[in-house]
Image (cartoon, grey):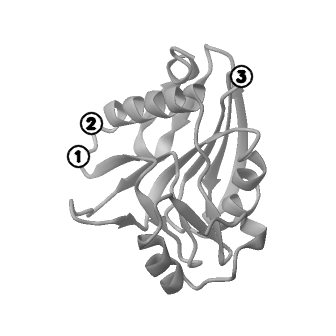
Amino acid sequence: MAYPAQASPQMTLAEFLEWEEAQEERWELIDGRARMMAGGSVAHNTIVGNVFGACKAGVKARPDCRVFVDSMKLLMPSGSVAYPDVMIACGTIAATDRAVEQPLVLVEVVSPATEAHDRGAKWLAYQGIPSLAHYVLVAQDRMLVEVYHRLDGNWQYQRLSGPEAILRLDAVGMELPLATIWDGV
């Protein structure tokens, strides 16, 4: 059964993980409520692919880091579950792992349908991940990136726009030109 997040029954993490196995669609669990993942536009898919490719190339110097695209599950200390558009995690990750628990970078490509959730409940859940150093929100309708950097336990906000702007992800030693993110969009 498909539920909008506000109408879904409250679930524990264990209940959700068991229930999710039987679903054809992908779902997230934020604050105990299941929410079906929205389909993406061509712009969304292109941007996700560009970010994934650039991040994969950017972490080559860090063999302990891996870049994941939207089908890798993220388990959070709060008991929430999400599927970020792009995720970078470093450390020991086995090829058989089905989830990541300690990401350094999370990227969400926002749309009118997902923006409030990505900036609201999901962002609040992401803030509880101790390893998280960068949360990146990428607009798909204009060349705009908003990034939250964790600095001394506090979140610093930065807004970037225009083709000359460069997104810096210091936790993984990577720079990503905005022109690369929107290539082909």
> Percent position (x, y) of residue 80?
58, 72
From this view, report whether residue 146 is shown above or below residue 126.
above
Mark in the foreground, 3 or 1: 3
- Height in image: 18 above or below 164? below
- Residue 32's image quarter? bottom right
Asked which quadrant contains residue 91, the reply is bottom left
N-terminal of the pair, mark 3 or mark 1, is 1
Q: Label 1: which residue?
A: 63
- Number of residues whose C-alpha sits closer than 10 Å to that of mark 3, classed few (under 14), some (14–19) or many (20 or more): few
Kindly identify the amino acid type of the residue bearing the numbered disc 2: Lys
Camera-side residue of 11 and 63: 11
Q: Position of residue 37 (x, y in %)?
A: 59, 54
Q: Quadrant of residue 182?
A: top right
Q: Crowding near pointer 1: few (<14 within 10 Å), some, many (20+)?
A: few
- Element assignment for label 2: loop
Estimate the spatial distance between the alpha carbons at disc 3 and disc 1, rounded to whole Å: 33 Å
Circles 1 and 2: CB atoms closer than 8 Å: yes
Of label 2 and label 3, which has the lower sequence position? 2
Q: Which residue is mark 3?
A: 142
**Would you name the residue on which mark 2 appears?**
60
Which residue is at a point 56% across and 78% down the rendered structure image? Answer: 79
Instruction: Tell me which amino acid carries mark 1.
Output: Pro
Given contact means CB atoms under 8 Å apart, are the residues at marks 3 and 1 in contact? no
Secondary structure state at the residue bearing disc 3 = loop
Q: Nearer the viewer, mark 2 or mark 3?
A: 3
Q: Give the amino acid type for the residue marked by disc 3 in the picture.
A: Arg
Which residue is found at the position 48% from the left and 85% from the top? 14
Residue 29's place in the image compared with 138, above or below, is below
